[in-house]
Image (cartoon, rainbow, N blue to C red):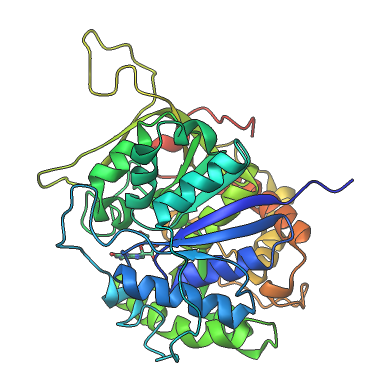
Amino acid sequence: MAAEPKKIIIDTDPGIDDAMAIFLALRSPEVQVIGLTTIYGNVYTTLATRNALHLLEVAGRTDIPVAEGSHVTLTKGTKLRVADFVHGADGLGNQNFPPPEGKPIEDSAAAFLVQQAKLDPGNVTVVALGPLTNIALAIQLDLEFAKNIGQIVILGGAFAVNGNVNPAAEANIFGDPDAADVVFTSGADILTVGINVTHQVVLTGSDREKLATSNGKFAQYLTKILNLYFSYHREAYNTDGVYLHDPTAFLAAVDPTLVTCMEGSVRVQTSGITRGLTILYNKQKRFGEITEWSNKPTVKVAVTVDAPRVDDTQEEVALDLFILALQAFYSLFNARRRNDTCTTTLPNSSTISNNIFNLDWSRLTSLLKQVSAVRNRLCACSNPLASGRSLNGA
Ligand SMILES: O=c1[nH]c(=O)c2ncn([C@@H]3O[C@H](CO)[C@@H](O)[C@H]3O)c2[nH]1
């Protein structure tokens, strides 16, 4: 008997990669999206709500409720940092889509999160794609929330790598570091996927060309909104490809075996020049004194694993899988910057003729698993965390 779809709420600041994650979620039979909650980040909250409603209308899923989230940080700060230079003034690549017809529900995002977790304790997953204010508010609103919520999967943090706002901080954590610290220390079941992982997941220019020729349900829409995201990455990273932050976090929520993790307590720097810095204490050293990490709950932090190199035959298989994965949404283009083993110009392959958004979910996830296993063996990872123990037995 097929497993029940996983109930998920997407807390989102759409956002171009948010749109990708939302569409991916709506096409995944493994999950039932029971609501979207909105937050500032890529845009202000009002626009995030408008975009969430718009995306559901594009997808024909106006049955899914949208609950508007906080307009201020946890400490009531109103000077918000909004990444319109990444996503455009409208958050969706400056396409000037018409306003949605729908309206958000009356409940606030935090109230909606609390209510849904209470209705089905242990069985609702929140996929948090923006700053963590709404989740922290839910934790403060209901002392049982951290226990009632099944899992919180966070797109956030830069673990042992530079941030993307500045060398210290990743954007979602930087958006509300106080909220992030509340969430990481709440005792909820947490998996966080930081840019140390998502920067390995790239949609390339040639992937986008394939997308442009596809008649998949969301292909034309995404091709359009991706233009600006590509320009930003070209400017910021000098690369013809875009990081798939939010889709990666969503996929990790659906199938946690796609990432390997370390466990430990995470604290967030809330002030000073390293505001937004995320530090994982991996519990490998016993400190002689009490620290700010002592006795804090453990969370899972996605990392890449360092594994033995493959022999020549396996490398051939690896390359094949590598190409397949490219067409299946998950290129590993970024590896070329780290390791020459992976620097080949990728040949064309038509092994998978389906567009990524038409791919069968189980095929996609099994491909991804194989590819990430092979890639991990091929590419020694530069992230020092990667030499840690794999919790998934990989
Ligand atoms: O402020 C930002 N600067 C970036 O370079 C950047 N790249 C992506 N993003 C968004 O923030 C999250 C990743 O840090 C994702 O949700 C991107 O949409 C960014 N935000």
Q: Is residue 137 above or below residue 388?
A: below
Residue 284 spot, x, y in % from top left: 39, 18
Residue at far left of view: 272
Q: Quadrant of residue 14?
A: bottom left
Q: Residue at x 60, y 43 (%)?
A: 119
Q: Residue furthest right?
A: 1
Q: Is residue 386 left or right of residue 215?
A: left
Q: Is residue 163 above or below residue 64?
A: above
**Residue at figure coordinates x 33%, y 77% from the top left:** 232
Q: Residue 301 placed where, x, y %?
A: 45, 38
Residue at image point 18% right, 47% down: 75
Image coords of residue 237 (percent x, y): 33, 69
Q: Quadrant of residue 361?
A: bottom right
Ligand 1 shown in quarter? bottom left
How many discs appear?
Answer: 0
- 349 w.r.t. 184: above or below: below
Q: Is residue 295 visible?
A: yes
Q: Is residue 1 above or below residue 325?
A: above
Q: Residue at x 68, y 44 (%)?
A: 311
| Residue 290 horizontal side relative to residue 283, left or right | left
Residue projecting furthest to the top: 288
* 98, 391: nearer the viewer: 98
The quadrant of the rendering that contains the C terminus is top right
* 265 and 176: which is toward the camera: 176
Tell which residue pokes out farthest to the front in this image. 106
Image spot of residue 357 (x, y percent): 67, 73
Q: Is residue 375 visible?
A: no
Q: Quadrant of the N terminus?
A: top right
- Relative to residue 300, is residue 26 drawn left or right? right
